[in-house]
Amino acid sequence: NRRHMKSGKFYLRWTFHNGLVEKKEDPLYCFSSSGRGQLHYMLGLPSMVLFEVAASMRSEAELSRRYAAAASELLRFVQRSPHLFCEDFAWETCMAARLAGDTSCVEKLRQRMLDLQHDAGCFHKDPNSKEAVDHTAEISICLCRSGNAVQISSAQEDQWIAGEAEDPV
């Protein structure tokens, strides 16, 4: 996908037989860094996972570095989008930015998520829909986990995960 990234595209689907599925106008198949209505989480989630894998492989420094570099490359690509802070589906990107230590991006995305909250307390226009439950759960967890992006160190989070400390959030 690197050659496509240079032109602002990232193809999200592939097959074993034909490789990348190049449907440029469908956000379920192609993330366009300049397009509106993009699903930023489609790259935010893999970036977040790659950061987590890198952190879990600290004992293998070169491998950890490579995973972190791939995570950073994906995150930087998503951050090229001029619509990142005004679209509705970027919460995984917020978590990736938190893991990268990009507090400016985290705070902007947190504010965007808070702006999405409706009077009923959920993060969807129809409070009775299953999407309302799904979005509210995902956004609430993201807001909770990203809330102290500046104050929580990796060591503190590792201690919490290992059960050696209170939840720092």
Image (cartoon, rainbow, N blue to C red):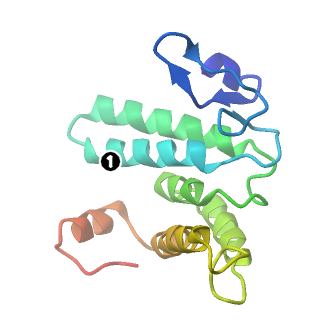
Q: Nearer the viewer, residue 16 or 161?
A: 16
Identify which residue is drawn at 66% across, 43% down. Answer: 78
Relative to 158, residue 120 above or below: below
Position of residue 71 measured from the top left corner of the image (x, y, whole percent): 49, 39
Pick the quarter of the image with the N terminus: top right
Could you tell whether 18 is left or right of 33 in the image? left
Residue 123, given in percent of the width and then of the height, sits at 65, 75
Against 121, residue 151 (above or below) is above
Please count the marks in the image: 1
- Picture layout, residue 77 above or below residue 138: above
* Mark 1 element type: helix
Q: Quadrant of residue 23?
A: top right
User: What residue is at 79 percent from the left and 60 percent from the top?
Assistant: 86
> Residue drawn at (45%, 70%), measured in percent from left and top?
145
- Please identify the quarter of the rendering in which residue 63 is found: top left
Judging depth in this view, the residue of 139 and 80 nearest the camera is 139
Q: Position of residue 10 (x, y in %)?
A: 65, 29
- The quadrant of the rendering that contains the C terminus is bottom left
Residue 98 picture location, percent across and down: 51, 59
Residue 72, placed above or below residue 131: above
The residue labelled by disc 1 is 55
Q: Is residue 22 left or right of residue 68?
A: right
Q: Residue at x 67, y 48 (%)?
A: 39
Q: Amino acid at mark 1?
A: Ala
